[in-house]
Each structure stands twice: as C-alpha cells, then as structure tokens.
Amino acid sequence: TFFNFTSTTAGKTINFTAGQTFRINGKLTILGADLNPVNLHSTSSPTLWTINHQGTESVQYADIDDSACDGSSNISLDSTSTGTNDGTCWLFPSLSFTISPTSVSLNLTSPTFTTTATNTLTVTARAEFGYTLTAYETGVLTHTAYPSKTIDDWTGIHPTGSAWSSTCIAASECGFGYNTSDADIGMSTNYSAFAGLLDAPGDAVASSSGPVTGEATTITYRSSVSAIQAAGPYQTTIIYIVTPQF
C-alpha cells in the first residue's frame, strides 16, 4: 500500500509482482518522455498484477502492461500512454460514435398521416466522467420543391417532452419530434422538439457519468400532419455531437 506513488525517470521499468495487489491511496504520478515511456509491467507477463487506485493521477508517456483492476476507481490517461492486457480501470483515451441507419424515412399516408422511424446511436467513450451526446436540427421539415411548405416542430420541450398519444387528424396533435430511450435524459415515452440551428450544439439526447463501451440509444422520430398538408418529400438534417468528459 502506497500513499503517493511517483516515477518521473523516462525509460524506467517498474515490475509489479504478478498475482499481487498494489493499492495507491494518494496521487499516482507517472511522467516519461516521447518514445521513452515509464514502463509499468508484470514480473511474469502475461500473468497480471493488480492495481487498486483510490486517489488522483497524472499519467503521461507511460506503458502499462498486464495490470488488472481492483476497486471502483478509474485512472485517466492522456493520449501519450499505451498498454496491453489491462483492466478497464485504465482509461486509455478512446472515442467512437456510430449512427445506424444514417437516414430515416417517415411515410405519412392516409388515413392517419402519422408514422414513426428509429435509428440507433452507439457510443464508446473511455473517459473518466463519461460523455454527453447532443442534437439539433438544421431547420424544420421543409418541402424539397416548395420551401415555403413546412411541417412545424412538435410542442414538447426538452428534456421531459410531452405526451403524443393521438394524431394531427384526430386531435390536432401535429408536427415533427423525437423520443430518446436514454434513461439519464428522462423523457420516458414523451416526445420533444429538436433544438434549433441557433441552439447548437443542441440538447442532450444521451449521456453517461462514467466510461462506457458500446452504449446504445434508440432515437424514435415521429411526425403527424393534417390531410391538407402539401404532398411531396420533406427533409431536414439532424446533427449529433458526442463530447467525452474528462
């Protein structure tokens, strides 16, 4: 067990006994140099040594190999550090984001002129405090041939939105909006309007307070119009921005 643990000699190799747990209660400071890191290795690779880190850290230019994790604390690393065969508490910076599909269609046909479509947003953010995923629209749904013809946004306000149980035809519940399945946002089954272009980077549609791998969120788009809405294709673009939190 250590209070502070510091190594600032570039190129130094510290071999931790395989099969044993090393606890650090204070600050972990590792500072190597470009192309000459401080090496934290196992005495018997690939057998793991274990770290239980309870304090803070400043880790740059380190090579961490064969280290398992004990306890709930994470260890933030910058992009200068590398490692192999390590536990998930070692947060080597990593961010990925996918949208599937990248285009959705809402076919508004008689008799209800109402429909929904979905896509899935998947985030991997190996960041100590997770991520925030925000969204905004570049404009209301606009007729591609007649720009004066538009479909207004739904009236629900982020983050709670409002219930949208009926249709424009049946109850004058008209517009275009979305629902997010992310429990942190708390929209439940309600729908909200997307933030506008002037509100970029927009409203949060998904988030996490800790590191995640492959966290998926379903966005459900819904539109409902009246029978006298001008027929034809309407279009808008939704911009999604994912921001890791360190």
Image (tube, helix red, strand yellow):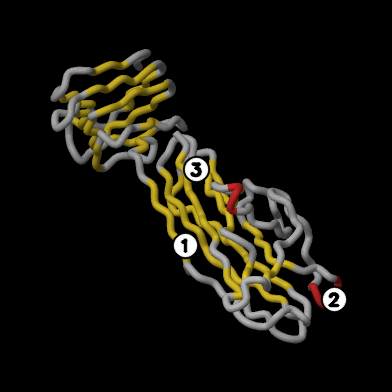
Mark 2 or 3: the one toward you: 2
SS under mark 2: helix
Q: N-terminal of the two: label 1 or label 2?
A: 1
Q: Pointers 3 and 1 in contact (CB under 8 A)?
A: no
- Amino acid of disc 1: Ile
Q: In this view, does 71 lie to the left or right of 138?
A: left
Q: Which mark is residue 131?
A: 3
Q: Residue at x 53, y 44 (%)?
A: 132
Image coordinates for residue 240, horizontal then vertical, percent: 51, 54
Q: N-terminal of the two: label 2 or label 3?
A: 3
SS under mark 3: strand
Q: Which residue is drawn at 25% across and 34% down?
A: 80
Question: Which residue, as the protein is rendered here, is positioned at the far right?
Answer: 171
Comparing 7 with 153, the one in front is 153
Q: Residue at x 62, y 70 (%)?
A: 142
The C terminus: image quadrant: top left
